[in-house]
């Protein structure tokens, strides 16, 4: 999602986004116009060591736009649906 640098001002501790591969990268790359390529943004994400944190952040905060954790909106929607189905199946087995 192209963080431009953030410090956890409350604790002063480093956050996962301090290690983001997209620090300083043009944010527009991560918010492509409808139908435009997401390839370049995903390429930046590919080598990112906080990819999982980024993806989970986007999922838990319901981020609807942009590339997060190497995934597009559509891909995140699909993942959310898959997880919801898995949770439902697990709860049905638990009964
Ligand atoms: S996964 Fe991608 S969008 Fe997320 S922090 Fe890393 S480079 Fe940035």
Image (cartoon, rainbow, N blue to C red):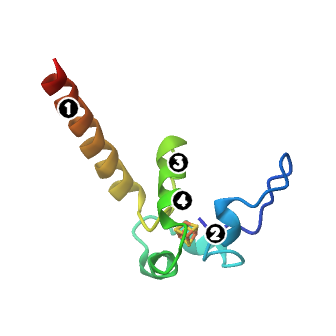
| Mark 1 surroundings within 10 Å by alpha-carbon count, few (fewer than 14), some (14 through 19), many (20 or more) | few
Mark nearest the camera among 4 and 3 is 4
The residue tagged 4 is: 54
Mark nearest the camera among 1 and 3 is 1
Query: From what the image shows, is residue 62 above or below residue 91?
Result: below
Residue name at image x 43 percent, y 74 percent: 38
The residue tagged 2 is: 2
- Find the distance from the CA under tag 1 to the CA under tag 2: 35 Å
The residue tagged 3 is: 63
Mark found first going from the N terminus, 1 or 2: 2
Ligand 1 resides in the quarter of the picture at: bottom right
Circle on res. 90: 1
- Find the distance from the CA under tag 1 to the CA under tag 3: 26 Å
Q: How many marks?
A: 4
Mark nearest the camera among 2 and 4 is 4
45 vs 8, nearest the viewer: 8
Mark found first going from the N terminus, 4 or 3: 4
Indicate yes or no: mark 4 CB to ligand 1 under 8 Å: yes
- Find the distance from the CA under tag 4 to the CA under tag 3: 11 Å
Residue name at image x 34 percent, y 58 percent: 75
Q: Position of residue 41 (x, y in %)?
A: 50, 76
Q: Would residue 6 be found to the left or right of residue 65 on screen?
A: right
**Local secondary structure at mark 4:** helix
Query: From what the image shows, is residue 16 above or below residue 27?
Result: above
**Local secondary structure at mark 2:** loop
- Find the distance from the CA under tag 2 to the CA under tag 4: 11 Å
**Local secondary structure at mark 3:** loop
Q: Would residue 45 be found to the left or right of residue 82 on screen?
A: right
Query: From what the image shows, is residue 72 above or below residue 57?
Result: below
Indicate yes or no: mark 2 CB to ligand 1 under 8 Å: yes
| Mark 4 surroundings within 10 Å by alpha-carbon count, few (fewer than 14), some (14 through 19), many (20 or more) | many
Residue name at image x 41 percent, y 63 percent: 71
């Amino acid at each position: 999602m192209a963080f431009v640098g953030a410090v956890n001002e409350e604790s002063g501790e480093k956050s996962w986004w301090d290690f983001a591969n997209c620090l300083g990268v043009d944010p527009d790359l991560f918010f492509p116009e409808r139908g435009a390529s997401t390839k370049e943004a995903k390429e930046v994400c590919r080598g990112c060591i906080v990819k999982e944190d980024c993806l989970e952040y986007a999922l838990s905060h319901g981020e609807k736009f942009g590339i997060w954790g190497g995934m597009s909106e559509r891909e995140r929607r699909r993942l959310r649906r898959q997880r919801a189905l898995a949770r439902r199946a697990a709860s049905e087995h638990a009964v």
